[in-house]
Image (cartoon, helix red, strand yellow):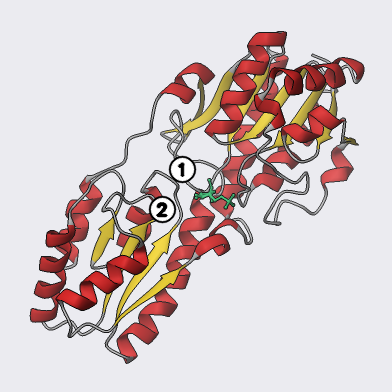
Amino acid sequence: IKRIGVITSGGDAPGMNAAIRAVVRACSYYHVSCVGFFNGYNGLINGEFEELDARSVRNIINLGGTFLKSARSKEFRTKEGRAKAYKVLQKEKVDGLVLIGGDGTFAGGQIFSKEYDIPVIGVPGTIDNDIFGTSHTIGYDTALNTVVTAIDKIRDTASSHDRLFFIEVMGRDAGFIALNTGIGAGAEEILIPEENLGLDRLLDSLEKSRRSGKSSSIVIVSEGDKIGKSVFQLADYVKENLPYYDAKVTVLGHIQRGGVPTCFDRVLASRLSVKAVELLLDDQKNLMVGLKDDNIISCPLDDVIHEKPSINKDLLRISEILST
Ligand code: F6P
């Protein structure tokens, strides 16, 4: 391998810049050249790229977002799109790729790599933490802290006005953000897609909490929750059935994707990305790097794409005990 390409793709996540920096600096350390493609796979298809050296990534370790920009490329899902991308790689003599993103990014990379025999290594970057093969994805820790900080603020006003707040958090089909911020911010109830607790149970719990003397309450709702109602409908349903509750809704939305990455995310991004370059230089391909028990490991992209990470449901039990 003489020349490595790097992209950030899918939803951006804080720490992606730290990951790009580590890819570029590792390339420089090992004396291989590095090219950054813009806008995810679209940059590969359209030949939008920039030569990157150790100095091009100065002062970005602390920045949210991704300076290479990100996209979910529709064209790369087509054979024609991937053929264009391969032509660009051939022309620019790029012989290995580091893909920073989530499962959609890896699924595309895996197909591409099999079609054209281009070695690819995935680096998990998404706030959702919904990737098999790693305990943590880049951006997840920052998002948790952003959410907890926001909920702390909502708690202040909820308490002053004796209100019930439904707070929707991101996570796509996974409840990692909801579950962990629910515990971290001391929510009364946490609704996640992995466990449908049902509407009756929600009403029971809110009723109990009222009877136990609580005057304000916080319910965290994961956006992928399967209870069958939107967060607004949930609030209305509770107001109809428990009229003493003054229920409000806050959808945290994209603030969860931005902001200064935490130290944890910067260190994770740095370790994973150096390893990704080292694997390519070691003639490895079609792997994703991940964190397991504080060690950097790698696992086949095939497994990452086909398996789902499991959520720690014991946290629901802890939440129930602590919201008593
Ligand atoms: O995958 C990250 C994520 O923020 C999800 O939590 C969310 O469902 C989705 O991306 C939102 O995507 P977009 O920014 O395209 O609206």
Q: Is mark 2 within 8 Å of ligand 1?
A: yes
Q: Which residue is mark 2?
A: 177
**Do residues under tags 1 and 2 come within 8 Å of each other at their CB atoms?**
yes
Residue 48 spot, x, y in % from top left: 87, 35
Q: CA distance from mark 1 to mark 2?
A: 8 Å
Q: Which residue is mark 1?
A: 129
The correct choice, above or below, for 303 with respect to 123 in the image is above
Crowding around mark 2 (Cα neighbors within 10 Å: few <14, some 14 to 19, many 20+) is many
Crowding around mark 1 (Cα neighbors within 10 Å: few <14, some 14 to 19, many 20+) is many
Name the element at disc 1: loop
The answer to whether residue 177 shows anywhere in this view is yes
Residue 19 spot, x, y in % from top left: 68, 40
* Amino acid on which disc 2 is placed: Ile
Occupied quadrant, residue 151: bottom left
Q: Is residue 148 left or right of residue 84?
A: left
* Amino acid on which disc 1 is placed: Asn
The residue positioned 85% from the left and 17% from the top of the image is 87
Residue 45 spot, x, y in % from top left: 80, 28
